[in-house]
Amino acid sequence: MSTATLQPPKAKRRWTYEAMAAELPETNQPTELWDGEIIMSAAPRPVHQTVTANTWEVIKNHAKTRRLGQTFVSPIDVVLSANKVVQPDVVFISRAQESIVETTCIRGVPDLLVEVISEGTWRRDRVDKKALYEQFGVAEYWIIDPDSRLIEVFALVKGTYQLNARGVGSEKVSSKLLSGLKVSFAQLEG
């Protein structure tokens, strides 16, 4: 008969952005903070990187020529709250919001976020992040699915995302936020 004493399970550490930034080394590995829990993902596939880079370039060029704001590509920390930190694939911040861009992160709610679905991130991007971005009031959210060659643009209307545009292959979608911006998946894949 064992006389070992049962120990209560150790509580999981609940991280804050400040603790994570201070204690963990800088990395290019996708790392997010959800309710204080660190979530790390595998590096994205080449098609994901191509679509992400091309999306960033299209939005950046559109915004830059019109002096609309700044565009960033992942990995970059977007601190929505002390224990909610995401790394969207592409981030746009309007000139009116530029004060949320700090030297180490973006602290606040960007105007537009883009997620490119990777293998294993379908639910996270389509359900979890969509609900999170809606809750925090991100004005426009794009979901790009390379496997389906699909772009969906959601616009925040009275606190709820409404599908603003949907395009497959060479069908162009328009941004509600960035007037005049039209893009198709075919432009982004190559």
Image (cartoon, rainbow, N blue to C red):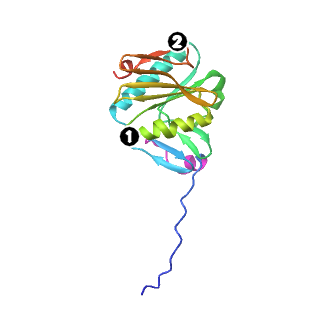
108 is higher (above) or lower (below) than 111:
below
Q: Which residue is the extreme one toward the bottom?
A: 1
Q: Which residues are magenta?
A: 18-29
Residue at figure coordinates x 56%, y 38% from the top left: 132
Residue 149 x %, y %: 36, 25
Of circles 1 and 2, the one toward us is 2
Q: Amino acid at mark 1?
A: Ala
Q: Is residue 5 visible?
A: yes
Q: Of residues 115 and 71, which is closer to you in this image?
A: 115
Residue 94 x %, y %: 61, 23
- Determine the CA span between mark 1 and mark 2: 33 Å
Residue 16 x %, y %: 59, 49
If the image is split into quadrants, where does the N terminus sit? bottom left
Left or right of 119? Residue 92 is: right
Left or right of 96? Residue 5 is: left
Q: Is residue 64 magenta?
A: no
Label ID, residue 180 = 2
36 is higher (above) or lower (below) than 65:
below
Please tell me how crowded label 1 is: few (under 14), some (14-19), or many (20+) other residues with Cα within 10 Å.
Answer: few
Label ID, residue 43 = 1
Instruction: Determine whether label 1 and label 2 are within 8 Å by CB.
Output: no
Residue at figure coordinates x 56%, y 46% from the top left: 21
Q: Amino acid at mark 2?
A: Gly
Q: Is residue 77 visible?
A: no
Q: How many marks do you count on the picture?
A: 2
